[in-house]
Image: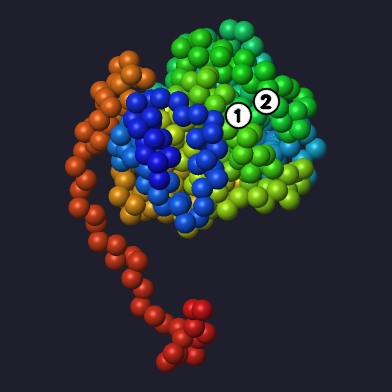
């Protein structure tokens, strides 16, 4: 396809595709899907090689949120029956983070529900950052605490935070349909505050909330303008008890097209497959690794994820490798102290021969020749 050739060429040059080109990616047919994945995969490998960055979420404060975000099970008035608790102590949060770090996570994302942190909350998080970093050399810490007031981003940076997450979620024109207790402009302001404080900005979207293709293009082009280093792509988990519980709009093919579009529009940014990948990509998850270079390991804020070992097996089976703490995620032009240039693959160590997976072989004890029902 001429479209894909053009998009690959632009991606390798960090050139922004047109809106029509981005829309055309979302409009491709299932027959063209593997061609789309292959094309976007060339761009992904050019900037990030075959490395996959693992991130791990720690929910510091669950539920109890005064905001009315329609997609969120922690929202005001939620009846989902999620865990609800107030702030974890630094040692509790550090212990929770240890499981993800043991599984190979390079970044710990500290998340707290609520409109935004008080100054006392920032002090709490500062203590947690110290507790995690004291025992784990090279770990990155990203904070996600809601809307920031003046000076709070700087205080988090001084406390040792490496990044700050605040997603745009959807297009500006439809934002009021999703949330009424704060504005799209509030979210943009917080991302800009993080940037200005020297934090690595992390901002992404949620797909599957009933938005149009044009809405998806709007939010991704807005993200391109904000220029975050990391772009989490969430796929709505329609949790019972939330206003969007009936929004089952995504197919695995649709998810792959969205990830490919994000990669073409933001070719050199860390694209992360975030919430909902297990629910919507299902057995197509390995294909998504050809588009995104980052995933969350383990569980999410209020819902369970795929088993950590299953993620590690999937990465290895797909021919990728887990990014180490000694490797720089971003291309050289984004990471001033980076050691990986545009030939990101050159920074990857030679893959070791895989260990025999004898655990995959189980002698049949059911079906023909037995009194047990067959596996069918």
Cα distance between the residues tagged 2 and 1: 8 Å
Q: Nearer the viewer, residue 142 or 134?
A: 142
Name the quadrant of the N terminus. Answer: top left
Q: Nearer the viewer, mark 2 or mark 1?
A: 1
Query: Which percent across, then down, holds residue 239?
Result: 69, 48
Please give the name of the residue rendered at 50% of the width and 14% of the height, measured from the top-left corner: 195
Q: Residue furthest top?
A: 151
Q: Quadrant of residue 45?
A: top left
Please give the name of the residue rendered at 41% of the width and 25% of the height, measured from the top-left corner: 15
Q: Residue furthest front?
A: 2
Query: Which percent across, then down, holds residue 208?
Result: 64, 44
Q: Residue furthest right?
A: 77
Q: Nearer the viewer, residue 217 or 343?
A: 217
**Vertical order, 75 against 155 (above or below):** below
**Vertical order, 208 against 86 (above or below):** below
User: Label 2's element?
Assistant: helix
**Vertical order, 125 against 211 (above or below):** above
Dots 2, 1 in contact, CB < 8 A: yes
Query: Which percent across, then down, holds residue 19?
Result: 54, 30
User: Label 1's element?
Assistant: helix
Return the disc, 2 or 1, that comes first in the chain's sequence: 2
Residue beneath label 2, please?
172
Residue beneath label 1, please?
218
**Colour scheme used in the picture?**
rainbow
Please give the name of the residue rendered at 21% of the width and 33% of the height, measured from the top-left corner: 346
Q: Quadrant of residue 333?
A: top left
Specify few, some or many for label 2: CA neighbours under 10 Å numbering under 14, 14-19, or 20 or more. some
């Amino acid at each position: 396809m001429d479209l894909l050739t053009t998009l690959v060429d632009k991606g390798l040059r960090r050139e922004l595709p047109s809106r029509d080109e981005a829309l055309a990616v979302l409009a491709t047919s299932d027959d063209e899907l593997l061609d789309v994945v292959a094309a976007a995969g060339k761009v992904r490998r050019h900037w990030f090689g075959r490395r996959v960055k693992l991130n791990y979420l720690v929910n510091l404060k669950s539920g109890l949120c005064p905001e009315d975000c329609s997609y969120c099970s922690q929202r005001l008035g939620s009846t989902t029956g999620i865990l609800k608790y107030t702030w974890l102590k630094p040692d509790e949060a550090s212990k929770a983070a240890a499981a993800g770090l043991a599984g190979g996570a390079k970044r710990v994302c500290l998340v707290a529900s609520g409109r935004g942190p008080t100054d006392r909350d920032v002090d709490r998080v500062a203590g947690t950052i110290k507790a995690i970093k004291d025992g784990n050399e090279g770990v990155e810490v990203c904070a996600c605490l809601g809307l920031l007031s003046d000076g709070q981003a700087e205080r988090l940076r001084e406390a040792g935070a490496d990044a700050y997450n605040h997603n745009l979620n959807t297009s500006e024109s439809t934002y009021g349909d999703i949330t009424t207790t704060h504005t799209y402009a509030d979210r943009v302001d917080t991302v800009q505050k993080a940037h200005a404080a020297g934090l690595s900005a992390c901002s992404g979207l949620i797909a599957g909330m009933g938005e149009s293709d044009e809405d998806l293009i709007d939010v991704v082009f807005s993200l391109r303008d904000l220029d975050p280093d990391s772009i989490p792509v969430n796929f709505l988990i329609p949790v019972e008890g939330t206003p969007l519980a009936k929004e089952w709009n995504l197919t695995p093919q649709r998810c792959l097209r969205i990830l490919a579009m994000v990669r073409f529009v933001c070719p050199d940014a860390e694209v992360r497959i975030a919430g909902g990948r297990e629910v919507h990509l299902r057995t197509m998850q390995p294909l998504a690794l050809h588009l995104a270079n980052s995933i969350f390991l383990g569980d999410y804020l209020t819902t369970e994820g795929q088993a950590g070992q299953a993620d590690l097996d999937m990465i290895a089976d797909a021919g990728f490798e887990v990014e180490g703490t000694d490797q720089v995620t971003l291309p050289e032009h984004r990471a001033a102290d980076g050691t990986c240039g545009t030939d990101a693959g050159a920074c990857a160590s030679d893959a070791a021969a895989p260990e025999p997976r004898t655990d995959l072989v189980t002698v049949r004890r059911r079906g023909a020749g037995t009194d047990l029902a067959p596996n069918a």
